[in-house]
Amino acid sequence: MKISIAVALLACTVSQVNGQQITSPLSSIRVTADATVTAKPERAQIDVGVLTQEKQSQNAVTQNAKQMESVLAALHKLLGPDADIKTINYTLSPDYQYRPIGGKASVNSYTAMNLLRITVDDLDRVGYIIDTATQAGANHVESVRFTVRDPQVLHSQAIREATLKARANADAVASALNLKITRTVTVEESGEPSAAAPDPSLEPPGPAPTPIQSGAFVVTATVALTVEVASR
C-alpha cells in the first residue's frame, strides 16, 4: 500500500467585523492510497495475422487474401460458425530500397498484413487456436491477452478499497495532530484494469498444443483525498 500525506493551507475564509475584513486560514490534509485486486482470467484475446510480401501490390493482396481465407476456414471449423473472430487491422504498405546518400529511394516490394482477433472464454483452447491458425497459413502472432468478462466490477472494488484506506489515513493524521475532519474537499481517482500476460512465451506448434498459461488479472486504483480539518 502506498501512502502519501500532506498538510497544507488550502484556502482562506473571509468575514466582516466592524467593516473590516478578517482572514482565517483553512487547513487541509491530502492523502493518497492505492489498492490492488486480482482475479482469475475468464477470457482470452488472441491476435494472429497473415503477412505477405510480393513485388507487386496486387500480388501481395491476393496472396494475403488466399492465406486468410484458409485461416478463417480452419478457425471456424475449430470454434464454430458463430465464433467471435474479427479483423482489427489491415495494412498494405510499400517497402523501400534506399540508395546511397543523394540517391532516390525506390519501391522494392509491398507488404500486406491482415490481423484477426479471436476472443474465447475457454482458456484451455488458446494453444489449439494458435496452432490451428498457424498451420492454416497465419505467420504472425501479435499477442495473447487474458482478461475478465467485466473488468469494471473489479475496478469499482479497487476504487472502494483505496478510498477506505485514504480516509483511514486521513483520520489517523488528523488524530495525531489533534485535529478533526470537517468535510471532504476533493476526491481524485486514477488507475485501470490491466490484462494478464501469457506465461510462458509462445512456442512453435508441434504434436501437442502450444503451451499457454495465463497469469493473474490485476486491477489497481489510486485515490487522492483532500479533507478540511479544524482544531478539536
Image (cartoon, rainbow, N blue to C red):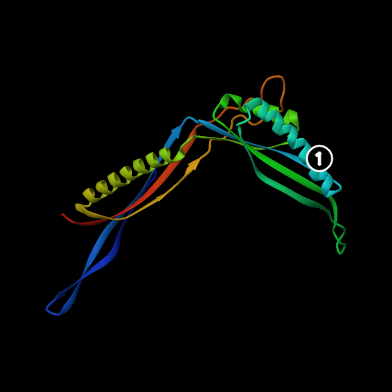
Question: Which residue is most to the bottom?
Answer: 19
Count of numbered labels shown in the rendering? 1
Quarter holding residue 51: top right
Residue 107 image position (x, y, % from top left): 85, 54
> Where is residue 135 drawn, in percent x and y?
74, 28
Is residue 139 visible to the viewer in this orientation of the structure? no
Q: Residue furthest top?
A: 207
Toward the viewer: 7 or 75?
75
Q: Which residue is mark 1?
A: 63
- Farthest residue, direction left: 18
Amino acid bearing label 1 = Gln
62 displayed left or right of 164: right
Q: Nearer the viewer, residue 198 or 120?
A: 120
Task: Give the residue drawn at x 81%, y 42%.
Answer: 62
Q: Secondary structure under badge 1? A: helix
Considering depth in this image, is 42 or 169 the residue closer to the camera?
A: 42
Residue occupying image coordinates x 30% and y 60%: 8
For this view, does 5 lie left or right of residue 78?
Answer: left
Left or right relative to 162: residue 211: right
The quarter in which the N terminus is drawn is: top left
- Quarter of the figure with residue 19: bottom left
Vertical relation: 134 (above or below) 182: above
